[in-house]
Amino acid sequence: MRLALLLTSVAAAQTIPNMQPANAAQRQAISRNAKAFTGRTCVACGFTAFPVPADASEAMRKQAAAFAVDHVLKTYAQVGIKVTRLRWGSDGGAEIYLKDDPAYMQVTNLNDKGRRYTITFGCQLK
């Protein structure tokens, strides 16, 4: 089973199931990053945000991001989709390109309004 099959009506909905819809600025940034990493732009974008406790050290934040990347990689492996390109970030996150899906994901740590998150941005590619 292909992961793309799980993304029902992605182009029509302009979002990705199990992810929050990205706003216009987020869609633009995700598509720009996807284009730079994969050479392709996005049809649909979304994100998930997991709060990181205020008392978590930077090492713990890095570990949380790496755990999220590992989860994404294992999920794709379970459905038989090979990673086309993977680039680890200094914060434990990574950029992931899956040509066969076709999808782009970026896992990173983000600070917003004094709160800290591990964010997964994703897009279905054109």
Image: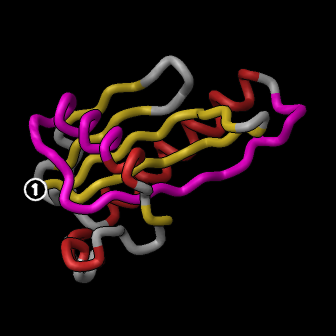
User: Which image quadrant is residue 56 in?
Assistant: top right
* Residue at (33, 43) in percent of width and height: 30
Q: Choose between 99 and 37: the one closer to the eye.
A: 37
Tell me residue 83's x, y (percent).
23, 44
Residue 92 vs residue 27, the one in the foreground: 27
Q: Is residue 37 magenta?
A: yes
Considering every residue shown, the one lying at the far bottom of the view is 8
Residue positioned 60% across, 52% down in the render: 49
Left or right of 122 in this view: 49 = right
Q: Residue 85: where, in percent of width, then height?
A: 21, 34
Give the structural element (helix, strand or loop) at label 1.
Answer: loop
Where is residue 113? Give x, y as percent.
Answer: 73, 37
Location of residue 75 in the rendering, given as x and y in whole percent from the top left corner:
39, 60
Q: Is residue 81 above or below residue 83?
A: below
Residue at 47% in and 72% down = 18
What is the crowding at mark 1: few (fewer than 14 residues within 10 Å), some, or many (at least 20)? few
Q: Which residues are magenta?
A: 28-56
What residue is disc 1 on? 126
Quarter that holds the C terminus: bottom left
